[in-house]
Amino acid sequence: MSREYDVEHKINYFTEDIGLNAFYFYLRQEYPFWLKGEEFGLEKNRGMKYLYGHKQLLSRYYLERLSNDIGKIEDFDWHSEFYVGYYPTMTYHNGLPMPQRPYWSKFPYYKFKYIKVQFSA
């Protein structure tokens, strides 16, 4: 669903790219942040590689925004509403659609405890 007043739909080719989504999936599988490295014998510098992969994706996203005249990435606040909605056209392998996020939605309060755990370490 693209809306004429929403300029974010210009980069749907990037946000719904199957190759980039597969890359991100395997990045998350290769460098799981929830596993203890000492316990499972993982690399010591895997956190740097994990962050580097995210930095690459964010840089490419920023480049796509600039090349489509959308502008810089705005500051983000967990407590305010998200202007941009997300209406993917992708589906899971079983045919069910990906979850949607309507315009002006808020982050659920019951998930704040997971954010605090992630960013406090």
Image (cartoon, grey):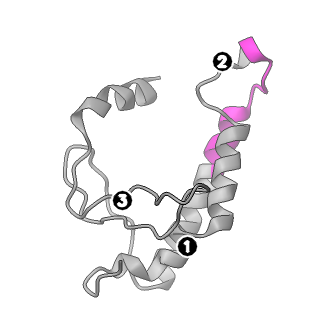
Q: Which quarter shows the N terminus?
A: bottom left
* Residue 112 percent location from the top left of the image: 29, 31
Q: Nearer the viewer, residue 56 or 90?
A: 90
Q: The magenta stretch spans which residues?
A: 39-53
Disc 1 and disc 2: Cα gap in Å? 33 Å
Q: Is residue 32 above or below residue 27?
A: above
Q: Amino acid at mark 1?
A: Phe
Task: Look at the magenta stretch and give its main secondary structure.
Answer: helix
Q: Nearer the viewer, residue 66 or 112?
A: 112
Q: CA distance from mark 1 to mark 3?
A: 17 Å
Callout 3: helix, strand or loop?
loop
Q: Hey, what amino acid is under mark 2?
A: Lys
Q: Residue at x 60, y 30 (%)?
A: 33
Number of other residues with Cα within 10 Å of mark 1, as a class: few under 14, some 14 to 19, many 20 or more = some
| Mark whose residue sits in front, 2 or 3 | 3
Above or below, 72 relative to 44: below
Instruction: Give the residue type that dot 3 points to.
Output: Gln
Secondary element at tag 2: loop
Q: Residue at coordinates 32% horizontally, 25% vertically from top-left?
A: 113
Q: Earlier in the sequence, mark 1 or mark 3?
A: 1
| Place of residue 2 in the rendered image (x, y in percent of width and height, measured from the top left) | 35, 81
Q: Which residue is mark 2?
A: 36
Residue 76 placed where, x, y %? 31, 53
> In the rendering, at what x and y percent does residue 36 appear?
66, 18
Dot 3 corresponds to which residue?
100
